[in-house]
Amino acid sequence: MGIQLRKLLRSRVIVVFGATSRIGRSVLEALAAQEQVSVALVAAVENAKDPRVQRLKRATNCYVIQCNFASGGEGSLRRAVRNADAVLLVPALSPSGVRFSKRVIDAVKAEQVARLVVVSSILAFPEVLARCRPGETDETSATEAVGPTQDDVEAVEGCEAVEAHAHTQLPEAGRAVTLRIPVLMETLLYCRDELLFANRFFGCFAEATRVPCIAVRDVGLAAAGVLAYPKRKYEPIYHLAGGPSASCSSQEVARCLGGLLGREITYRKLDDLGFLLLMKEKGAPSQVARGIVGLRVLLEEPVQREEPGEALQQSHDVVAEPRGLPETFHSTGDYRLLTKRELVTPRQWLQRCAALQFARTPQNQTQLFVVGSGEALFLEVSKFVAQQITAPSSLPSREAGEGAIPTAETPGRHGGSSDLQHAKVTLCTVKAAPGTPERARTATVPLPPTVYQVEGAAASPMGNLLQQLSSLDVVLLIPPLRLGTWTCLDVVRTVVHAAVNANAWGIVLVSSLFVGSSASQQSAALEQLEEIESCVKTSGVPHVIVRLPLFMEYFLALSNCDEGENRSSEGFGGVEEEEKCDVLSGTQVEGVETEPTEGSPSSHMTWPLLEPSLASSRVYLMALEDAAKALVATAFTFPLHRGRTRVLFTASPTMQEVQRALQKHAHKARSVRLSRVDALGERPGREFWRIAYWPRAHTQQFLECAVELSKAAKTAEAQAGGEGEHRAMVLPVSQRFKDVTELPPVTLGRWAEANSKCYTRALAALKAGE
């Protein structure tokens, strides 16, 4: 009824399908802004109560018609386009989207609408999609195994199927007009979180490859011009390509963004499979992602041609030539013909959008709230963060990688120039635990938050201190395992409860890489970590679980069983080196009450490090320094990891290989004999948790799991007839350390070289006369 009334007022009725897409919204905004023609805008949507629809209605003053997009809803589609002068169709590229688009075209034909404009993509055509190699996705191989289904066929057809159906059903000249567009510049917005939190963006193109592109606003202007004049004669197909001026390389984008944002921006090239998976994770249509990969092949991979008159068997006569820009992407002048304008260049688009979309502000950056109890890992995180705050020049951001504390621009006082502000970092150390006996507690009845003494404040309820948490904080939770099972769980529950109440960004939780591993046997230590993970997962708070291995600093906590009581007085490098070793090994947290240490040093070894089963097993290791960098980097880039479990380690040597590395770098070539070192022997003041975070029980669990994994790998190799590879004994990782931090890891050799005096002092055999 409303549409007919607008017709009487001589307004041209334009119906838009795909109104909530970027292109659909841009077309509606362009039509609403133009003043040459009076138009009545109608958004045909599936759900009129969708918040995006309500925002669009307020912005463009359009009418909203709710339609049945499912099969059988043809009647509602015909009612939507009845009495319309023109219809815009922005096809969805899913199989159901293709079928729906065809039903819209049928409705346009049945209602004799004068003009249909279809926004099509050059990337979605089979000649581009076919260049995505088979087997690049799991779905491809599965399809090939059973044969293509109807959904698969229609998904591959994509926009070409919609375009062909439109020109078949509406054969009259100029009635169906197709606008073919290259890559949208707004595709960069899929990398918005990476740019905001990690100063990088990703793609599958080489850095120097020039990619043809167009701004969504230009697409909207071109479509609006064709829709506003349904009686004008137009060609059936227009290519909205602008040649070299409307193309750019990833290298140019990084350089331009860096200059506009005032910070270094890097480009990360992914392989085709990695790009497809990441785009799927970002919610990009499958055909768009696969089309971009096909375009990469089209632009980058050389053409093989044969020299005329030469034999086919001579491989050197086959010459590789770069493909160059396909003809469909050459400048056509079509956009200027339709709009009397020039296409926006990539640089102009970045100048317009960079500050709005990618600028850092205090409101869109994460803050760090670290909770621990003075263990080695907590101290290493504190040290890494403090180096950046107290002496930024001593640790440049490129050396901190993605663990660099982010800075954001804040408005200057009295309208002056803006200032740079570091993200807030809070370090919370739990120093004392309640003395409730463990036997009085049950796993099924969690106790209310209890009173803890926290560093920087007098004895006060921990919940009160955690009220400092805000919605901008990411909590880096290092479970205080050394305080005992139930005390540790109390701390975890209290922190999680506070994070939920503060609506914090989320929690980064430290756990063991053997949690959930098939090689791990049930133990009290493993059950404790599983319960901690479950507490975080079931809380509803966003989280990332980082499962870490045994730390290399474990070897600094061990001692040679032949050393005797007078070993502690031995020194190698004078007073200065002695103090350095004491800092690494004797860090004492004032006022800490710990449980009695199990396995105090005894006169005999309980488990020699080179015991046969352990000597040949792979031990998964990581330097504490690297662990701190990975945890801080994960916290400051939390939106990139949200909801995932990261398994990280940087080395997987056997214990025999560990001995060779330690011996190679031993101070003064002293003999390092791990056969005389007890794997579980602790000394007072040098407990494992002080030096390498994991308490004795968890350290034992790491070593036992390593042995079990080695046995399982050897059994599998024997069953396979001895053809298994040695590397099959290595656990898979969910992400490489360098991918998390943008830094190379500390190798076992480098670690041994840096700590040679400290570990030699503890592990080397005594010389005669000492």
Image (cartoon, rainbow, N blue to C red):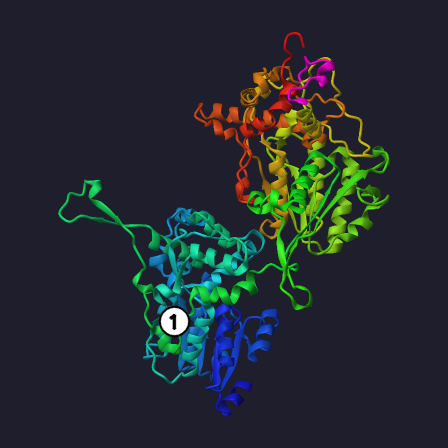
On-image quarter of the C terminus: top right
Residue nearest the viewer, comparing 215 with 746: 746
Whether the magenta-drawn stretch holds residue 51 is answered as: no
Residue 175 at least partly seen: yes
Q: Position of residue 667 (x, y in %)?
A: 59, 20
Say which quarter of the image contains residue 681: top right
Residue extending farthest to the top is 769
Q: Position of residue 410 (x, y in %)?
A: 65, 61
Above or below: residue 690 compared with residue 599: below
- Queried whether the magenta region covers residue 572, the answer comes back as yes
- Camera-side residue: 17 or 362? 362
Q: Compare residues 177 and 660 and report the one nearer the observer.
A: 660
Q: Provide residue 164's location: percent of width, then percent of height.
A: 35, 69
Q: Is residue 109 visible?
A: no
| In the image, residue 676 above or below residue 34 | above
Classify residue 310 as left or right of residue 15: left
- Could you say which quadrant of the image residue 166 lies in? bottom left
Determine the residue positioned at 50% across, 76% down.
28
The relative height of residue 285 versus residue 560 in the rendered view (above or below) is below
> Which residue is at 60% across, 50% downward?
637
Quadrant position of residue 47: bottom right
Q: Which residues are magenta?
A: 560-574
Q: Is residue 424 left or right of residue 28?
A: right
Residue 590, position as x, y percentages in the image: 80, 34
Q: Residue furthest left?
A: 309
Residue that carries the numbered disc 1 in the rendered image: 179
Considering the image in quadrants, where does the N terminus appear? bottom right
**Few, some or many C-alpha atoms within 10 Å of disc 1 (few <14, some 14-19, many ≥20)?**
many
Q: Main secondary structure of the magenta part?
A: loop
Amino acid bearing label 1: Leu
Element carrying mark 1: strand
